Image (spheres, rainbow, N blue to C red):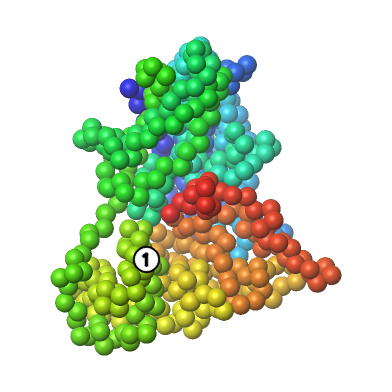
Amino acid sequence: MKLIQTIAFLLSLSFVNSISAQAPNLRAYMDNKQFYAPGSGNYIEIYFQFVGYSIQYLPVTEGLQGEVAVSIQLLNGTTVVAQDAYRLQSPIMKDSIIDDFYDVKRFGLEPGKYTLALELLDVNSKNPSIKASQTIVIEDLSDAITSSDIEAIEYATKGDESSIFYKSGYNMIPRLSTFYPSQLTSIPVYFEFYNTQLLEDSICGLKQSIINTETGIELSELTSYTKETTGEVLPILRNVDITKIPTGKYALTYTLISRSMNELTTQSYLFERSNDLEITLDLETMVLDPSFQASISNDSVAYFLESLIPISKPAEIKNIIEVLKTKDIEKERKHIQAFWLKTSPGSSYESWLRYKSQVQLVERLYSNNFQEGFETDRGRVYLQYGSPTNVIIKEVSPTEYPYEIWQYNKIGVFSNKRFIFYNPDLVNNAYRLLHSDMLGELKNPAWPQILSKRSTVDGTIDNPNSNVQKQFGSGSSDLFRQY
């Protein structure tokens, strides 16, 4: 089996005494993957993710903008065989929203061993540049049935060839981290097989499997097979469900198989998972606590059980829905009590009362004509993450939809996270989540453009979703949300 581990490293520089404490410290992630293009040859893609808050920004007409100088050299021994040097401007940052930004560069290379040398400089900062180097090996993918590396994706949208992130009909934003916490329930991936037309058959099989690399055990319940049509280039775009994968280290493996069941080529993506699976409590033997009973009237039991969904994991949500279908008030009461016994073993009743008051608060603030408060996006975020540190509210503008920006100084181990809600209907207090930089939430890089789609010409209002594309890995029915 051919296992290629994703090589990604953090480029960083510690503060030095002569640099002001206010100056941000440039941080960036780099990864590379090999592909092949018939008629052009083997090539490498080099991905960069620049950490938004680590860049120094300067004011421009519409907000703030940073700039990074990038120098890339590919050397064979001491000979430079390919290079590029350029300046990359960040997207314009608006209303204090600082997002990470990405870049990709492609270089055609002959098979062989190379040194990749990088230098990055924050143009607006007085900090010195960051330098790093890495050895890479380019294989010959041209003359046999082979495969590219597997590229993990943050999200992908239907795109056009003008984008630097375009491949096979999609603009794909690479994911440079191989760590998947419990908030993420899928791994979107893209890769290619080459020269499958050399097979005598027009059909081949593709096996997808996930193997625990610490035990060598294949998770058989997640193994799947599909039929693929052979060709010079066979592109594969998949969204792999990892909801039920427990904590551990794994290899997501794809094996191309002939009709006679011979394995033709194999490629793997190594990742680490953190996911404490749910423990099922026995509701049948549970004795109801009189305090819990007294805190919920019979006509509101179902309401408060459903209100637990914003703070529940996928397996818990499924159980809640099943209990609600029974319309059995005693089971519903037991489920509420069981939830808090599991969530807060030492103070279950007190924790429930605090949450109940929050549910009642979001009902008053965010409910509308067709949604309870906890069903709205703002209500769900409030219940899941708590009260925001700061809120920017813009309700009146002739050129933008009403919107709110919620900023959190801290969410668990994450710092400086933001949520943007907007109201494209202009009525009913029905604000929707448009974008967030929180892990597992909807990410929409085009949110400033969508806010500005409002038009007051002749009293008409544009459809805010008319040009919004489905995102693989970030929210749609067939191309799933990264959650």
Residue at the (84%, 70%) spot, across then down? 458
* Residue 228 visible in the shown view: yes
The reply, left or right, for residue 161 in relation to residue 181 is right
> Disc 1 on helix, strand or loop?
helix
Residue nearest the observer in this picture, 50 or 189: 189
The reply, left or right, for residue 414 in relation to residue 94 is left
Bin the neighbour count of mark 1 within 10 Å (Cα to Cα): few under 14, some 14-19, many 20 and up.
few
**How far from the left and from the top, in percent, is residue 425?**
66, 70
**How far from the left and from the top, in percent, is residue 54?**
50, 52
Q: Is residue 123 above or below residue 46?
A: below
* Residue 66 visible in the shown view: no
Number of numbered labels in the structure image: 1
Label 1 amino acid? Answer: Ile
Where does the C terminus fall, quadrant-wise? bottom left
Residue nearest the observer in this picture, 90 or 388: 388
Where does the N terminus fall, quadrant-wise? top left
Residue at the (36%, 46%) spot, across then down? 242
Q: To which residue does mark 1 refer?
A: 321
Q: Is residue 416 above or below residue 210?
A: below
The residue at the far right in this view is 458
